[in-house]
Structure formats: structure tokens, C-alpha cells
Image (cartoon, helix red, strand yellow):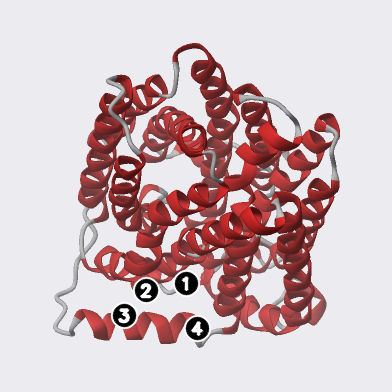
Amino acid sequence: MQLKFIFRAMRHRNYRLFICGQSISLIGTWMQQVAMSWLVYRLTNSALLLGVVGFAGQIPSFLLAPLAGVIADRHHRHRILLMTQTSAMLQAVVLSVLVLNHQIAVWHILVLSVFLGLVNAFDMPIRQSFMVEMIEKREDLSNAIALNSSIVNMARLVGPSIAGVLIALVGEGMCFLLNAASYIAVIAALMAMKITPKKILPKREHVLHDLKEGFLYAFGFTPIKSILLLLSLVSLMGVPYQVLMPVFARDIFHGGPKTLGFLMAMSGSGALAGAIYLASRKSVIGLGRMIAVTTGVFGLGMVIFALSNALWFSLVVVGVSGFSMMVQMAASNTILQTIVEEDKRGRVMSFYTMSIIGMTPFGSLMAGTLADRIGAPATLLIGGVCCVLGAAIFVRKLPAIRAKVRPIYIKKGIIPEVVSGIGAASEPDALPKK
């Protein structure tokens, strides 16, 4: 770990503005997420409905993310982000008004979750592909991605803790209201940026043509395809463990909203540590193997958590799982961002969004259904085993992935040793080994 490299992306003005706005807004986002899950479980006492609400909020990303990718490649991403962030703020305002006036019903939550899901379906892939426009020096891109993950998980650490206290003191409505206010920061940051509009080439092809082109490119190239498939598996079988956290907090550990906040915060602490670790790395060398290892550790952590009845031990396990999940996802993001062709960046990042956010609703629905029938611990146990098996399959594909990625890194000058002549590309021992 090299600490001097952690903040190198912050020398870019637009990125500094982005990080400052995001750091405030994301705390509100995590507060709303925890408050939403607790509100649903308090109103319904149903693990199934927890899954249904999670499904309703995330299924739009699966259906619409590819279209968002085409839009990201055809239009100005900065302007679209302003619209999506404003729409998300309005959703939080409506939710807070309904809860604070004691008029909230489950159908309100479902409708508003779908609306936010529609917004996020466009916001997430466009925000991911917008990252490169804020970073003038391409060698800082991997650091920018890792720092962004650090901010996400710092908010994940702070947000649930605040939410747990606020829910216990004044109820869920205040969490939604504060989330609405937090969007002001990120909207102000976007408006303060000085963005050089990218050159938009006229498109004569139909949208479906661009969708097909992006799909064939992503799933016809072994490294991108393998990473996307592994992300999809983890999102389907692993990430939905968060949906069941209220069940563990109340029924397994016999706690309340504070216990839920501790569990989510510990997961966020581990994820934050993972993001900081990635930010401290100087190069992308070794990320392929790291993806495989952390996927396996994450799956094993789920298995252990499912079998544990001790809260203190489970908190430690959740922290390790959070670390592994973050490193796996952020490392995957970094590799995708650094090997993708520029004119297809938006579409590839839309498939990345589908793999992470789009698959999660199916996992949430499945996890809620299974938890109602076989219990939350058994559900997590199955998911953890599947993640371990996925990691084993990815390990077998690593040699083919390395062979495809290495020439791209050399061509783009991403590997400093090759560019500076420290190692000659013609010498096998000088080529980067993952």
C-alpha cells in the first residue's frame, strides 16, 4: 500500500467538486436506504415484501440501462446528470412528506421505488461513463474510481449509523427529508463544473443498432464478458444479503434499528477499507487475480455469517465481506474503464450497471421468497456457496483474460514501466503479470 498515491485524482478541479457533492449526497442516500427497509419491515413484518420493494426499485436498471448507455454515447452526460439528480431529490421530498404526515402506505413505497429506479437506470451508467470527462490524465482514472468508491463507502459507514439513531428518535421521515436536502450539494457541484463538451458525432443508425453493437462488443470480448458475468452472479446471489439485514437484526440478533445500523455500518467500514486499499495502489497490475480472490472471500464470509448467532462475531464477518465485495466491484470497474473503447464506454458501463444494479432486484426477490420459506440464514448460505463457485470458475479463465488485456494496457500506455522503457514489451518477463 502506497499512501502517497491515494489522493492523486483530487488535483483535477471537476473531480474535486464531484467528490465534495457526492460525499454529502451519498450519506443521505444510505440514510434513505436503511430507513426504507426498516419502514417496510415495520409496516408489513414480511421478508417477502422487503424483497418485492427491492425488486421494484432496481428492476428498471435491468430493463433500461442499455438504453441509457446509448444515450451516454450520443449526448452530453453532464446535462443528463443534472436532470437525474434533480428528479431523485423530488422523489425523496415526496416520500418524506408522506411519512411525516403519516399517510404512507406500502403501495406508495412501491410506486416511489419504481420512480427512483427509473431515474437510477439512467443516472448510474451515465455517471460511471462521465468519470473519464472529469479526469484529464488517464493514468489517474483508476485512482478516481477507487476514491469514488471510498466516498460511497464512507457514506455507507456514516449514513446507516445516523439513520439508526434518527429512526429510533424521530422516525423514518426525517431520514427521507435529510436525503432530499443532501441532493442540493451534488447539484451545486455539477453546476459549478467547467466541462468541455465532448464532440458528439451525428448518428444515423437506429438506437437498436447501437444496442446490438454494444452487446456484441462487450460479450464478444473475453475480459469484459467474464467480468460482467461474475459481477452478475455476485449481484444475484450475494449482494441481496443486505435486503435481509432487518431480519437478522430483529429476529436473529434480537435487536432494533440501532442493531441494523451497526450491521450496515460495519459492512460499510469494510468496504471503505477496501476502497482505500485500491486507491493506494499505483497501477492496475494484479487486479484480475484480486477479483477472483475477493469474490471467494466474500462468498465464504456470507456462509460464516449465515451460521453465526453471535452479534460481535457477525459484525467482524460483515466487515470482511464488505471489504471483499468492494474490492471485487471496484477492481472490475477499473479494468472495464481502462480497456473499453471510448466510443463504446457508455454502453459497456450500462452493462456494468445491469450486472450490479440490474441483477440485484432478481436476487432481492429471490432472497425474500426463499427467506420466507427456508429462513434468512439458509438463504445466505446458498448465496455464499454460489459466489465461491463463481470465483473458482473465474480463476480458470484468468490466463485468457490476461492475454487479451495486456496488449491493450501497453497500447494505451496505462502501464508506466512499459511506457518509460523500464521493461521492454518484447521481453516476456517485462510484461505485467496479474
Using the rendered image of the protein, determine whether residue 201 is visible from the camera's viewpoint: yes
Q: Name which residue type carries label 2.
A: Lys
Callout 4 secondary element: helix
Query: CA gap, disc 4 to disc 3?
Result: 12 Å
Callout 3 secondary element: helix
Q: Pointer 3: what residue?
A: 211
- Disc number for residue 219: 4
Using residue 326 as the reference point, say whether residue 177 is left or right of it: left
Q: Which one is earlier in the sequence, the residue at label 2 or at label 3?
A: 3
* Residue depicted at 27% across the width and 20% down the height: 101
Query: CA gap, disc 2 to disc 3?
Result: 10 Å
Q: Pointer 1: what residue?
A: 340
Q: Position of residue 410 (x, y in %)?
A: 60, 73
Mark nearer the viewer, 1 or 4: 4
Q: Are marks 2 and 3 in contact (CB under 8 Å)?
A: no
Report the label total: 4
Query: CA gap, disc 4 to disc 2?
Result: 13 Å
Mark nearer the viewer, 3 or 1: 3
Q: Pointer 2: what residue?
A: 344
- Asked if residue 387 is positioned above or below residue 88 in the image, the reply reads below
